[in-house]
Image (cartoon, grey):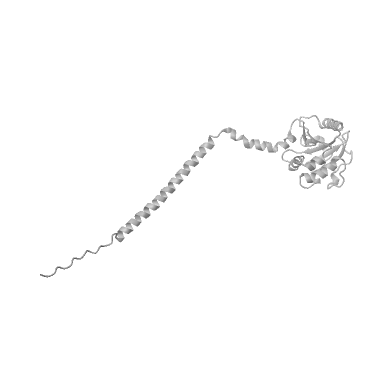
Amino acid sequence: MPAAAPLRRPTAGPLLSPRLIAAVATLAFVLTVGGALGVALALRHLKKLVDERGAREEQTAPASAAPAASTARTSEVAPHAHALSTETQTTRIGSIELVTLGSAAPELRGALRDELGRSRTTGLNLLVAVMDGDDCEPCLGFLSSLSAPEMQSALRGARLLVLERATFKEELDELGLRTDVQPMFLRFDESLGLLDAIHGGEWADDVAINIAPVLGAFSRGAYRARRYPIWTPARGGQRL
């Protein structure tokens, strides 16, 4: 009897066919891309919700939050506000006595006589400053410099009277001075004769270190060398 042929174990084929592998890879790619897009869309939607909530909170914020900025601006210009007052005000900046003649004051001649009398009583030299309002940067520079040590020392023996040019323009025009240069500084004798006058062109930048040497000497009647000698009036040549 012939011998039986040995049994052969069938050869196993590949577990995954190339087509199946490709299908799985394609599905994985689609799921990955789709997941990323889904996350991006979710994040975009979340950001939109946050922005909308922030906008609603701003609209419903208390109205009292707004005046804070206004208060800050007011405090910044407060040192210069006296130059525009309607009432005469007297303040002290360190050693400097500052008088702002308001627009409601009597005519300039009477006001100057009163201030000259007060200055004589207190032993101070009356220095008159003529300037414009808040749109005059050199004027604001001068006012801001008054608290500096240099100005405190230079004007220690002076009483400073501030006039607004527009309010007293007619009286100032009678002095024969150009009033289109600001600020101006005037000195009068007891009979309201104009002793001397200078303007802010006598120094460079409007800072204390430049202003103090000029105004200190001018307030004492000792300012000699000048940038604008022709503008200087003759002593007592004009009277109010």
Numbered marks: total:
0
Residue 80 found in image quarter: top right
Compared with residue 23, is residue 44 higher up or lower down, i.e. above or below?
above
Residue found 45% across the figure and 46% down from its top: 43
Q: Closest to the observer: 55 or 190?
A: 55
Q: Is residue 180 visible to the viewer in this orientation of the structure? A: no
Q: Is residue 166 left or right of residue 236?
A: left
Residue 130 appears in the rendering: yes
Q: On the image, which quarter does residue 15 sit in?
A: bottom left
Quadrant into which the C terminus falls = top right
Q: Position of residue 53 (x, y in %)?
A: 49, 39
At x 87%, y 32%, the residue is: 120
Would residue 220 be found to the left or right of residue 66 on screen?
A: right
Query: Residue drawn 51% across and 39% down?
Result: 54
Quadrant location of the N terminus in the rendered image: bottom left
The image quarter containing residue 82 is: top right
Determine whether 57 is above or below 9 in the image: above
User: 237 or 29: which is nearer to us?
Assistant: 29
Q: Picture coordinates of residue 201 (x, y %)?
A: 80, 46
Q: Position of residue 93 (x, y in %)?
A: 77, 36
Q: Residue furthest left?
A: 1
